[in-house]
C-alpha cells in the first residue's frame, strides 16, 4: 500500500510540476516571432500537452506500486491503459485544433485506440474466470463511451468552450475517482494524477493563457472509461447498470446540455454545464458512495 509521502510526491507533486512546465511551454511558444500561431506550432504544442497529461497519470502508477504491471503480461490489466493513452496523445491529440474536423481518418484512429484501450484493461487470468462473460459488453461500453465523449467534448471546443473545457473533463474524471473510492482504492489514487494535471490546465485555460487544452480530451476519455470499467470488475456490489452508464457518458451528457444553449452568452453556457456536471457527479457519488 503506498505511503502518504509517495502519494503526495507521485500523485500530486510530480503531476503538478510536469503539467505546469508543459503549460508554460505551450503558453510562451504559442506564437512565433512574427506573432502568428501557425498550424505546425499548434500541432507540436498540442502533442506536448497531451503527452504531459498522460505522463502525469503514469506517475500515479509509481505511487500505487502498479508501474511494473505496464510490462508484466500476467500482472494487473488496468495500468496498461497508459499505452493507448500515449498512442492517442501522439497520433490524434496533435490535430485536435488543426485537422480533426477536415480529416475523418483521424476519427478512425480514435475508434481504434478506444477498442485497444477497452481490450487491454479487461482483467484476465485464473482469478477472473467468473468475470469473462462481462468482457464483451464492457469492451463495447468502454469503446462507445470513449468515442462519444471524445466527439462531444471536441464539438464543445469548436463551439467556443475551450476556456472551460478542462472543467468538464475534471467532472468526468470525478466519476471513476468516486467509483474507485467505493471499490478499489488504488484506482482513486491513480485518478489523483489526472485530477491534479487537469486542474492545472483548467487554471491556465481559465485565464485565457492556454489555447491547446482540447488536446487532453483524447487521452482523458480513454482514461475515464477504462477506470470505470476497472471499478466494475473490482466490485461485487449490486450497483444498477444505469449508474455505470451515466458515469461512462458523463462528459457527453454535459456536452449535450451545452449544445442546447450553444447560442447563448458564455456565462449562461458555463452555468448550464456546471449545473449538469454537479447533478451527474452527485448522482454517481450517491449511487457508489452512499446508497
Image (spheres, rainbow, N blue to C red):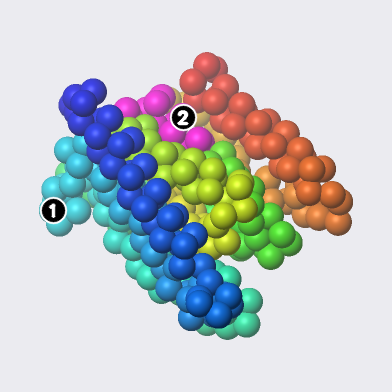
What label sits on residue 178 in the rendered view? 2
Does 41 appear above or below 230? below
Q: What range of the chain is rendered magenta?
A: 173-185
Q: Is residue 224 left or right of residue 258?
A: left
Task: Quickly name the residue at label 1.
Answer: 72
Q: Residue at x 39, y 50 (%)?
A: 19
SS class of the residue under badge 1? Answer: loop
Q: Is residue 238 left or right of residue 272?
A: left
Q: Is residue 16 magenta?
A: no
- Most prominent secondary structure in the magenta stretch? helix
Q: Is residue 149 visible?
A: no
Circle 1 residues within 10 Å: few <14, some 14–19, many ≥20: few
Q: Residue at x 37, y 36 (%)?
A: 192
Q: Position of residue 178 (x, y in %)?
A: 46, 29
Q: Position of residue 47 (x, y in %)?
A: 41, 68
Write down the quadrant of residue 202 in the picture: top right
- Tell me how far mark 2 sits from mark 1, CA to CA: 27 Å
Q: Is residue 176 magenta?
A: yes
Looking at the picture, tell me which residue is in the foreground, 199 or 78.
199
Q: Is residue 28 visible?
A: yes
Name, please, the residue furthest toward the top.
290
Q: Position of residue 115 (x, y in %)?
A: 42, 64
**Quadrant in the picture for the N terminus:** top left
Amino acid at each position: 500500500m503506498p505511503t502518504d509521502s509517495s502519494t503526495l510526491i507521485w500523485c500530486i507533486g510530480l503531476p503538478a510540476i510536469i503539467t505546469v512546465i508543459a503549460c508554460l511551454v505551450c503558453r510562451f511558444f504559442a506564437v512565433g516571432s512574427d506573432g502568428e500561431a501557425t498550424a505546425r506550432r499548434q500541432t507540436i504544442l498540442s502533442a506536448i500537452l497531451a503527452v504531459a497529461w498522460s505522463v502525469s497519470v503514469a506517475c500515479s502508477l509509481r505511487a500505487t506500486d502498479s508501474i511494473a504491471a505496464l510490462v508484466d503480461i500476467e500482472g494487473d490489466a488496468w495500468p496498461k491503459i497508459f499505452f493507448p493513452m500515449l498512442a492517442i496523445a501522439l497520433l490524434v491529440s496533435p490535430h485536435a485544433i488543426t485537422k480533426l474536423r477536415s480529416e475523418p481518418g483521424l476519427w478512425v484512429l480514435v475508434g481504434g485506440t478506444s477498442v485497444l484501450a477497452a481490450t487491454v484493461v479487461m482483467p484476465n487470468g485464473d482469478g477472473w474466470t467468473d468475470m469473462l462473460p462481462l468482457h464483451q459488453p464492457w469492451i463495447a461500453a468502454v469503446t462507445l463511451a470513449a468515442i462519444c465523449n471524445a466527439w462531444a467534448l471536441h464539438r464543445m471546443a469548436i463551439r467556443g468552450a475551450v476556456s472551460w473545457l478542462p472543467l468538464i473533463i475534471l467532472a468526468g474524471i470525478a466519476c471513476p475517482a468516486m467509483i474507485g473510492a467505493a471499490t478499489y482504492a488504488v484506482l482513486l489514487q491513480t485518478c489523483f494524477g489526472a485530477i491534479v494535471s487537469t486542474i492545472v490546465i483548467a487554471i491556465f485555460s481559465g485565464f485565457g493563457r492556454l489555447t491547446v487544452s482540447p488536446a487532453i480530451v483524447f487521452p482523458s476519455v480513454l482514461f475515464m472509461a477504462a477506470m470505470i470499467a476497472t471499478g466494475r470488475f473490482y466490485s461485487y456490489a449490486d450497483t444498477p447498470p444505469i449508474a455505470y452508464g451515466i458515469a461512462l457518458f458523463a462528459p457527453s451528457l454535459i456536452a449535450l446540455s451545452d449544445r442546447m444553449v450553444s447560442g447563448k452568452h458564455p456565462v449562461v453556457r458555463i452555468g448550464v454545464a456546471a449545473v449538469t456536471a454537479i447533478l451527474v457527479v452527485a448522482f454517481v457519488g450517491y449511487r457508489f458512495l452512499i446508497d
